[in-house]
Amino acid sequence: MTDRAVVSIDFELFQHTPAYRAASGELDDHTVGLDAWPFLRDVLAEHDATATFFVVGEVAEQHPEVIANIADYGHEIASHTYSHRLMSSLDGDTQTAELEQSRDAIQAATGQSVAGFRAPAFDVPVGLLRRLEDAGYAYDSSIVPARRIPGWYGGEYEITTPCSAADIDPEIQELGELPISVMPSIRLPLSGAWTRLLGRTYTQIGMKTIARQGGVPILYFHPWELVDLPPVEGVPRRVTWRTGKWLRQTIRDLLAMDFEFVTAASIIEEERL
């Protein structure tokens, strides 16, 4: 039987990334990343794959036709907040507003309900999961069980398989949790910048290892990683390394593996106790 895997896309524009917001230079084009959708549309269809797009609400509000088109192709649309600000930088009321406004913008664009959520930079302050549940979300996918690496996320969690978010916060009643995959043993993420830094073979080996252990690889990428980025003064080289053509070929190679690529929501629904 073919193993299952999830390719998720954190559908933000390059202007939303912390690296760009902290840079001294500026973009002339503030839609950089949006034009990754035609490539994703075609390559996912070529491999009969469905994906989950965690969409920033501002993008859904400003480009509703793109988000509606993603949904029309059968992909899941979930929330990546409204403005892509770090949740730990916001007070509780503003966090709740981010959750509600992003969901409203996505639902207005697609006409569909929103079940899933992922926090920008996997930043999960205390109380956020409870706010997600109170706001009516069905699952979160913001936990990364990676080892702590200075300057990166990681070190807080060890959960590696789909579970109830009550395993993280005992006050949770119904919210599911879908953690991002890390390489077994060394506990480094399999996707995102780590694929670009460590190579596509690293990600492929990790996916096969997780599958052999009975797990489901959960990967994530960004649309701006798939386009040819313009130079921006002050953006670190690690942010732009192997973006564009190299990562597009990597996505092709990953989707050609012997996996059935499904949505995050389908895994949560099947795995939930």
Image (cartoon, rainbow, N blue to C red):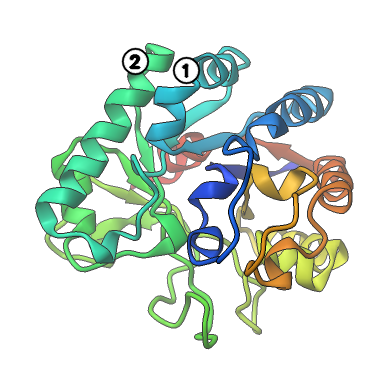
Q: As displayed, is residue 118 above or below residue 58? A: below
Q: As displayed, is residue 152 above or below residue 141? A: below
Q: Which residue occupies 78% across, 60% down?
A: 208
Q: Please count the marks in the image.
A: 2
Residue 271 coordinates in the image, percent (x, y) = 44, 45
Local packing at callout 1 (Cα closer than 10 Å; few below 14, some 14-19, many 20+) is: some
Residue type at mark 2 is Ala
Indicate left or right for 263 with 231 as reference.
Answer: left
Residue type at mark 1 is Pro
Residue 205 coordinates in the image, percent (x, y) = 81, 66
- First in sequence: mark 1 or mark 2? 1
Dot 2: what SS? helix
Whether residue 209 can be seen here: no
Q: Which residue occupies 73% across, 31% down?
A: 40
Q: Which residue was labeled with disc 2?
A: 108
The quarter of the picture where the N terminus appears is top right
Q: Are marks 1 and 2 in contact (CB under 8 Å)?
A: yes
Residue 63 coordinates in the image, percent (x, y) = 50, 21
Whether residue 162 can be seen here: yes
Residue 161 coordinates in the image, percent (x, y) = 48, 61
Dot 1: what SS? helix
Q: Which residue occupies 10% across, 50% down?
A: 93
Indicate left or right for 52 with 235 as reference.
Answer: left
Picture quarter containing residue 201? Answer: bottom right
Indicate left or right for 58 with 239 as reference.
Answer: left
Q: Nearer the viewer, residue 100 or 133?
A: 100
Q: Which mark is residue 92?
A: none
Q: Nearer the viewer, residue 216 or 99?
A: 99
Q: Which mark is residue 64?
A: 1
The alpha-carbon separation of the residues under discs 1 and 2 comes to 8 Å
Q: Which residue occupies 46% across, 62% down?
A: 121
